[in-house]
Amino acid sequence: MNKKALRADILLLLTALIWGSGFVAQRSGMEYVGPFTYNAVRFCLGSLSLFPIMFYRAKKNLTEHADGSWKTLFLSSLAAGTCLFLGVTLQQIGLMFTTAGNAAFITGFYAVLTPIFGGFWGRKTGAWTWVGALFTLAGLYFMSAADNIHSINVGDIFAFISAFFWTAHVLLIDRLVLRNDPIRLSAGQFAVCGLFCFPFVFLIEPHISVFVANIAPTLLEKGTFAWLPITDIVAGLVSASTIDIINLLIPILYGGLAAVGIAYTLQVIAQRDAPPAHATIILCFEGCFGALSGILILAEPIGRWTLLGFALMLIGMLLSQWEVIIKSRRKEVV
């Protein structure tokens, strides 16, 4: 392996680590603010964090599809941002009821769904993809049911549904990036997603506690996810202690700047030199990092069924991409 490929693999591993541990930040952030507030702030921050990169690329004439119109960019950002908004909203609500590890692995189910749904757009779906889907679904069941095999965690259901929107988002970006600069498109879609969240901060978020009380009242009894309205939070920042403000800002800044801005940039840089097979395998470990971070930082419980579910889902994700991995290996040899 040459030095460039090795450096790219290290950057991809760091990307998977940031994305995986980002699920901990998403869950921790909701101890202070609601899901729509958290997503609104972090995606707007993520969009703003890409502006320096955009200006630098424009100055150095590195912008791709520079002749593309602003109308094309706007419509593309609107389409991708809407899909992203639906995915992150379901994922964030799911994190109210499930662990960071579960959410990370279940979100990774899009790695299986993408080649399957890609078949509707003329892409061939091989046998290994279907085998991988079976392993992943089996893992999803054992992981979600945990020690109670006869029930499914409602948060896992939300995360599972969100995986379909992540799949649609991947397929959509695959088309839109052909007509737009990837950095500009990312900044645009993040901005759209963040702005879409703001109305729900005031319209929906105040009523979520009623929804939680009907599904998992123990969460409110423990004080978990019993956040204040955004107006009270803003007013409270004036009189809040420095420690409280830091505890509030850390998960928001990590979710916005690290998980969105930094990780995306690292991925773009890494995939220029990383063989596709390496990128596929390494990024599949996002779920592993999410589970490990949840255990180490949030002390999330893990049992034998959960471990079995994690293992089956990881195997399924890798199997679903097996044909891509084999083809990439053959090209490297040639």
Image (tube, rainbow, N blue to C red):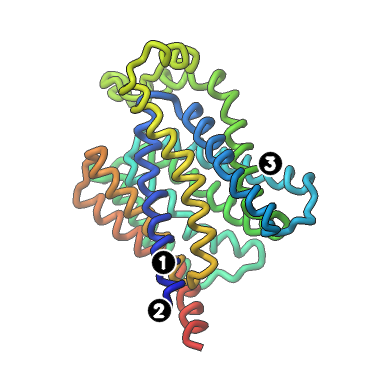
Q: Which residue is mark 1?
A: 9
Camera-side residue of 308 and 227: 227
Q: Nearer the viewer, mark 2 or mark 3?
A: 2
Judge from the rendering whether residue 220 lies leftward or rightward of residue 320; answer left or right: left
Question: Looking at the image, do the residues carrying marks 2 and 1 touch, with CB atoms under 8 Å apart?
Answer: yes
Q: Who's the residue at 29% across and 43% down the image?
A: 294
Q: Is residue 92 visible?
A: yes
Camera-side residue of 300 and 133: 300
Query: Where residue 151 appears, x then y in whole percent?
Result: 31, 40
Quarter of the image where one finds residue 232: top left
Question: Looking at the image, do the residues carrying marks 2 and 3 touch, with CB atoms under 8 Å apart?
Answer: no
Q: Residue furthest bottom?
A: 334
Q: Is residue 131 visible?
A: no
Camera-side residue of 304 and 151: 304
Query: Where residue 298 appears, x then y in whole percent?
Result: 26, 38
- Under mark 1, the amino acid is Asp
Q: Earlier in the sequence, mark 1 or mark 3?
A: 1
Q: Which residue is mark 2?
A: 1
Judge from the rendering whether residue 174 lies leftward or rightward of residue 95; answer left or right: right
Task: Count residues near mark 2 (Cα–Cα under 10 Å), then give few for <14, some for 14-19, many for 20+.
Answer: few
- Under mark 2, the amino acid is Met
Q: Who's the residue at 25% across and 50% down the image?
A: 306
Question: Looking at the image, do the residues carrying marks 1 and 3 touch, with CB atoms under 8 Å apart?
Answer: no
Q: Who's the residue at 51% across and 46% down the image?
A: 261
Q: Who's the residue at 42% across and 67% down the image?
A: 7
Task: Count residues near mark 3 (Cα–Cα under 10 Å), then give few for <14, some for 14-19, many for 20+.
Answer: some
- Under mark 3, the amino acid is Leu
Judge from the rendering whether residue 86 lies leftward or rightward of residue 245; answer left or right: right
Identify the disc placed on residue 78: 3
